Amino acid sequence: MSAKEPAKIGCCVKTSEDGMSAQYCCCMVPVMWLQISAGINVLLAWIFAVSAAGVCDFMARVPDDDYDGVDPFLVGLFEGKGTGDDCESFDDLDIDADGAIKAGQAFAVITSLFGGFILIGMIVSIFIRFPPILWRIMMIAVFVLAPFQLFTLSALGAEDCTDESYIYKEGCIPAAGASLSIVAFWCWLSAGILLCRMPAPEKPLFDCCNNGAQCCGGQPGQQQYPSSVVNTAYPAAAATTAMVPVAPQAQKRTKTITEEKIHPDGSRTITTTIVELDE
């Protein structure tokens, strides 16, 4: 009898006969390592995404060649440093949060918020078995967050980066925040590819519900009884049954009637009849 094929998360998953390994690149890799690697990539992507949204130097406008002594003008998605070292609000720096910056803010919030939900799901999957549909939802969400992370770079097209200035060059270049956002994009993409190449795990890495019990969405677990209970309860019931006497079958009373008849030629005929008597 062939083993049951494990449920696939992606569309091109190749697994071993026992379902414990899956093909990744050119070799078979244990599903456990694919799950762990995907979780690590999700964790790194979320950390980089949150950091990119929170720093005050997401992008920088560098000075013109004639002003080498001027520091770059640093701006984040929600605050900026300007030419100083401390974070200040946009109002203090006289920065207009136009549509480009607001778009970058929106995508930064989306990736940080929903990325946190996916990270929680990856952590919970270590202890609880997830159905295949939930793994597919997380895979699709990770692939969606990857381009959303790049959309935060739309802040580079802000008006404060493109207006004319005698001191700074036209246009902003990626600073620490934008670089973190690009790294987060590759981490989201790597996590999505890893999830796409693995089957849905049959059991969690650390089973908290005793071999996939019903609280984890698996098959109901079998309750284990101590051997002493089994040895004392069931034989006692069997002994009770054996001690019940079986009533003997009642014997029926009969009467035998024998008749002898003498014929004229001298021959005899003997007839025997058995009659049951009423109780």
Image (cartoon, rainbow, N blue to C red):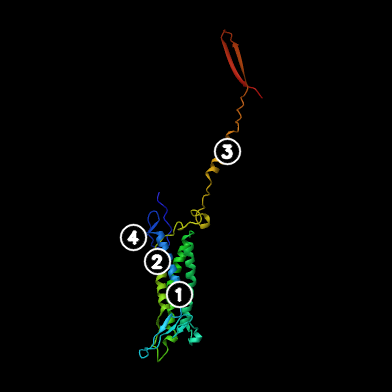
Q: Which is in the foreground here, disc 4 or disc 3?
A: 3
Look at 57% across and 34% down and name the residue there: 242
Contact flag, marks 2 and 1 (Cβ < 8 Å): no
Residue corresponding to mark 4: 27
Specify few, some or many for label 2: CA neighbours under 10 Å numbering under 14, 14-19, or 20 or more.
some
Are circles 1 and 4 on residues that touch, CB within 8 Å? no
| Residue 260 visible, this orientation | yes
The three-letter amino acid code for the residue at tag 3 is Ala
- The secondary structure type at the circle numbered 3 is helix
Residue lying at 46% horizontally and 66% vertically, measured from the top left: 138
Going from the N terminus, do you reach mark 1 or mark 4 first? Answer: 4
Sequence-wise first label, 4 or 3 = 4
Picture disc at residue 186: none
Q: Which numbered disc covers residue 193?
A: 2
Q: Quadrant of the C terminus?
A: top right
Please indicate, yes or no, whether residue 144 appears anywhere in the rendered image.
Answer: no
Q: Could you tell me the amino acid type at mark 2? A: Ile
Residue to which mark 3 is pinned: 236
Of callouts 2 and 3, which one flags the residue occurring earlier in the amino acid sequence?
A: 2
N-terminal-most mark, 4 or 2: 4
Judge by depth and name the residue closer to the eye, 99 or 168.
168
Q: Is 149 rendered above or below residue 84?
A: above
Task: Verify CB contact (< 8 Å) between mark 3 and mark 1.
Answer: no
1 vs 4, front mark: 1
**Residue 140 placed where, x, y %?**
44, 67
